[in-house]
Amino acid sequence: MTQTVDAPDVGALLERHRRELTGYCYRLLGGAADADDAVQETMLRAWRAYDRFEGRSSLRSWLYRIATNVCFDHLGSSKRRERPMGLGGPQPAEIENFGETLPEERWVEPVADDAVLPREGDPADMAVGRESVRLAFVAALQHLPPRQRAVLVLREVLRWSAAETATLLDTTVASVNSALQRARATLGAKALDRDEERWGTVDDELLGRYLDAFERYDMDALVRLLHQDAVLNMPPYTLWVTGPSEIARWMLGPGAGCRGSRCLPVRANGSIAFGQYRCAPDGGWRPWGLVVLEDDGAGHVTGITTFLDTATWFPRFGLPDHLPAEHAYDAAPVAQRA
C-alpha cells in the first residue's frame, strides 16, 4: 500500500535532491539557466505525479528519470552549446574587433559550485564531481548525442551501474555499455586528460598569485603562471587568443582597460574564479566580467574565460554590483571568501 505524504512533506522530499539534479542537468545541457529550468520542471512533474509514484524504484532514481526526459526534450530543439575555441581559429593579439557576438544560448555557461556540487562526501567522488563540471569537460559533453551524454554522466560521474542506467533509459545493459564506449572515444579525442592525482584540487595558491599579478598588471609575473598552450576567451564574443606572449600582448593592447581592476574570488565549475571590476568614472569599481581560470593541476593556468554578461552572472555568484574606492584584494582569505 502506498503511504500518503502531505504536500509540504512532498516538497521537502523533492528539495533534498535539487543540488544533485541541477548538477546532472547542467552537465547535459551546458547552461546554468537551462539547468535551473529543467530542475524546476522536474520538480513540478514529480509533485503532480507523486500520488502515482508507487515506490517501485527509489525516489532519487524516479527523479533522475524525469530530469533525463526533461533534458532530452530540451536538447531535441536546441543548438549545441560551444566555446569560442570550437568555432574557429585564434585571432592575433592586436585585433580590435572582438569577433561575432552570439546569443547566450550558444555558449557553455559558468555555474557556481554551490549550485551543483555537494559540500561533503567521499573525497574521490567529490573530485570526480569537480572535474566533471569544468568548462572544458562540459563543452566536450555537448559533442555527444543526448543518450550518450546521459550514459556517460550516470556511469562515470554518478557511479550508477550499467543495469541501473539501462532501467532509467528503458534500454539494455549491452546498449548502455556500447553508448559508454562510444562516448569515451569521443571525449578521448578531446584531449581532456589530467593527472588523476591532482583531480578535483582547487589551487588557491595559484589564484592568489594570479590575482596579485593581474591587479598589479605585471605581465611578466602573469606570463610565468600561464601554460604554453593557455587560451584567453570572452563569451559572448567569438574572439580567442592563445599562448602566454599573445595573451600578454592582448592585455596590453585591446585589453588594456583591465589595468587597475579589482577582483573578488568565487568558486565556479570546480575551478578557481573571480569577479573582475574595472575602475568606475565616479569612483570605485564597476562589474566587468566573471573570470573562470582553468589549470593543469600543476600550478599553471591553461584557460582564462571571462563571461561579460555581468547582469546575469554577478547576482548568481553573490557578487556586489559595485566596489567602493577603498577596496583592495587580500590574498589571505581566498578559501574563506570563496
Image: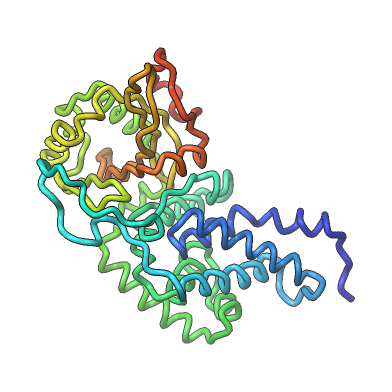
Color theme of the render: rainbow
Mark count: 0
The image shows residue 36 at horizontal and vertical percentages of 56, 56
Q: Is residue 142 left or right of residue 54?
A: left
The image shows residue 296 at horizontal and vertical percentages of 28, 46
Most foreground residue, 70 or 143: 70
Q: Quadrant of residue 94?
A: top left
Q: Residue at x 36, y 56 (%)?
A: 103
Q: Is residue 228 left or right of residue 131?
A: left
Most foreground residue, 147 or 57: 147
Q: Residue furthest top?
A: 326
Q: Residue at x 35, y 34 (%)?
A: 288
The image shows residue 76 at horizontal and vertical percentages of 46, 76
The image shows residue 134 at horizontal and vertical percentages of 39, 52
Most foreground residue, 241 or 186: 241
Q: Quadrant of residue 212?
A: top left
Say above or below: 2 vs 297.
below
Q: Residue furthest front?
A: 282
Say above or below: 216 vs 151.
above
The quadrant of the rendering that contains the N terminus is bottom right
